[in-house]
Image (cartoon, grey):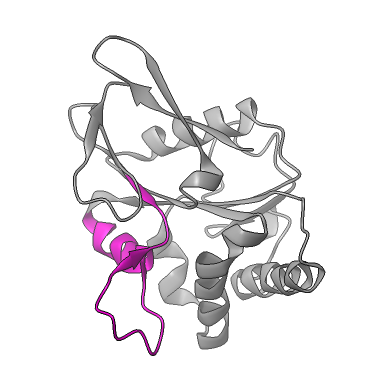
Amino acid sequence: MITIKIGKKSDGSLVNKNLSSLPNLFVSYQTNNEFNHFVNQIITANLLYQCLVISKQNIPSITTAVLETYFYDNPEAGTILNRNSIFSTQYKLLQRAKRKKNNKNISLIIIDDIWQVVPKLKNNSAKQFKQLLNEGSSFGFYFIIGSSMPYRNLLLQLMTDRKEGNKSGVINQIGAEMIFNIDGMIFFRERNEINFITYYP
């Protein structure tokens, strides 16, 4: 179980969420420091079997408790050198977990700036990434994906599961959304919910 601190209610009580209930989290932020602080809290508060961080190199303390890293501004400084190999490796692990049907390991994949990753993936890697998002949570693969506010629309596109052959017209979202606004407030909505709930930092 991965516990995530969402924020505080007006009475000061703390609100936590279990990531498996979301099951992915899409975060829009004003500054990188907001996202880095949020992620560091998650990493230090949870004992994770596997954590992959895809980010800039200059994130203080974020790499001290993770097993794998990919730095898009300096790949040679991380443990993974090729951005396309990131998701092909995770995809193979997903297929293995699906065959076993009893994966008990939890893998957390954190991306701090989606614009630096997805548009630059090759076609096959992009498909594997999308399948990981759509199916991964059933087998212990969870995502926390961040973006600066100008690219929030890209997050919204990823949140929407558009499976071929779906003629019901029902929009299925594959995760919850969290927004850090310019005044320091936190807006959060569960998967498939329209309205946000406001929390304090």
Q: Residue furthest top?
A: 11
Q: Residue at x 71, y 39 (%)?
A: 48
- Camera-nearest residue between 98 and 125: 98
**Image check: 80 left or right of 15?**
right
- Camera-nearest residue between 181 and 188: 188
Q: Quadrant of the C terminus?
A: top left
Residue 184, given in percent of the width and then of the height, sits at: 24, 26
Q: Residue at x 38, y 90 (%)?
A: 165
Check if residue 39 falls in the magenta segment.
Answer: no
Q: Which residues are magenta?
A: 150-177
> Does 181 sit above or below residue 85?
above
Q: Quadrant of the N terminus?
A: top right
**Image check: 61 left or right of 174?**
right
Check if residue 156 falls in the magenta segment.
Answer: yes
Residue 52, given in percent of the width and then of the height, sits at: 65, 52
**Image check: 19 left or right of 102?**
left
> Does 198 sit above or below residue 79?
above
Q: Residue at x 66, y 54 (%)?
A: 140
> Does 121 sit above or below residue 28?
below
Q: Residue furthest front?
A: 168
Q: Residue furthest right?
A: 100
Figure disc tally = 0
Q: Residue at x 54, y 74 (%)?
A: 131
Residue 34, given in percent of the width and then of the height, sits at: 37, 33
Task: Give the quadrant of residue 180.
Answer: top left
- Camera-nearest residue between 196 and 53: 196
Residue 97, given in percent of the width and then of the height, sits at: 76, 66
Task: Give the quadrant of residue 166.
Answer: bottom left
